[in-house]
Amino acid sequence: MRFQITRRALLAATAALAVTGSAALAQDRVTLRLSAVNSETDQRAVAMTEVFGPAVADFADFQPHWNATLFAQGSELEAIASGDLEMSITSAQELATFFPEWSIFAAGYVLQDAEHQVAVFNDPLMDPFRQRVQNELGVRLLAPMYLGRRQVNLRQTQDQLNVQTPADLAGVNLRMPGTDAWQFLGRALGANPTPMAFSEVYMGLQTGAIDGQENPLPTVVDSKFYEVTNQIVLTSHLVDWNFIAISAELFDGLPVEQQEAITAAAQAAADSGRAAQLAKEEEAVATLQGHGMTVYEPDVAAFRETVQAAYLDSDFSAAWPEGVLDAVNALGN
Ligand code: KDO
């Protein structure tokens, strides 16, 4: 029996194959929505957009949402756990609301610099911390992002309020992010901590609802806090970091080569963002002085001693696994 394939049938078969083929390819593509609080000019956003996205473009559509436009600050991890979000840029403070032991990585005057952050993140001491987040929250932490040395940033001029020791912050209404670990740090600094979402801080400073806030200097530049504040007190009370986070269920369901590509892309983005943020931090004092701000160093030893004593005497340190603080300190300089 000879088959007579008509030209029409051949065209129909080719078209059908193209559709199923492209559908199959489309099915292979994964959507990676990332929700984060920072602005699109923040070095973490630049690194994710310019490094991470292109590096996974062969098989994934990276869709970043900045300025907390997709999920409110602090709600991202639950969104990932419930399958409503794929990625976020999370923090030790947010993780500490689920797993108290994480507060060790959010404690004032523990991490010393960007290099120390990378050494800690890559050290086996992190394995039980990461494993718990993965097993119990369904979130994988791919790489550490450098946020910077957090400084106190006040509306008052130095003539009105000259901060040398924690006693000088007594009664100062200092905005801190909303979690317990952040509020504790604000009290340890000597201030009266006020919980407020990052997206409301500019308005809070402008209206006087808060006397000040604390963040790394690149953030003061990116969020234009220099327009509504007058001084920077270089407490360097927390060398802060974030983590590129992804849904464990999504990640584990991908082919190994795509898992490896995503991990490498996250590490490359974190490295790129870290270098850019460090450079921006170096020039930030001059930038802010150029905007008319006063920048000065207080009695940092007094702040360090007060803050460290507060933590060691707190319920937070009671949750820190035995020996981890010594191991973290040993990785520093
Ligand atoms: C903030 O709310 O002050 C904070 O610095 C907390 C960080 O963990 C991080 O969420 C950061 O905001 C945002 O990424 C904006 O820089």
Image (cartoon, grey):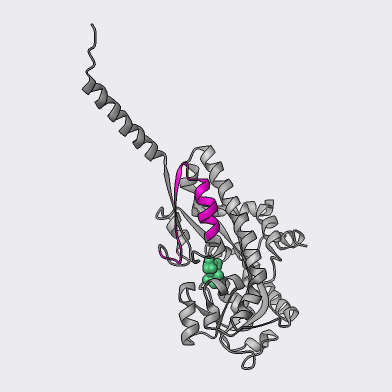
Residue 55 painted magenta? yes
Left or right, residue 22 beside residue 158: left
Residue 147, placed above or below residue 56: below
**x and y percentages locating residue 281 in the rendered image:** 64, 69
**x and y percentages locating residue 42 in the rendered image:** 54, 65
Whether residue 175 is visible, yes or no, is: no
The image quadrant of residue 180 is: bottom right
Residue 185 painted magenta? no
Which image quarter holds the N terminus? top left
Which image quarter holds the C terminus? bottom right
Q: Residue at x 49, y 66 (%)?
A: 39
Highlighted magenta segment, given as a residue range: 46-69
Whether residue 75 is visible, yes or no, is: yes
Return the residue found at the far top. 1
**x and y percentages locating residue 7 in the rendered image:** 23, 20
Q: How many marks?
A: 0
Residue 138, placed above or below residue 281: above
Left or right, residue 309 beside residue 91: right
Left or right, residue 88 beside residue 23: right
**x and y percentages locating residue 189 in the rendered image:** 64, 80
Residue 17, placed above or below residue 188: above
The image quadrant of residue 276 is: bottom right
Residue in front for this viewpoint, 202 or 140: 202
* Ligand 1 quadrant assignment: bottom right
Residue in front for this viewpoint, 20 or 142: 20
Q: Residue at x 69, y 67 (%)?
A: 110
Residue 143, placed above or below residue 112: above
Q: Residue at x 62, y 71 (%)?
A: 315
Return the residue found at the far bottom. 160
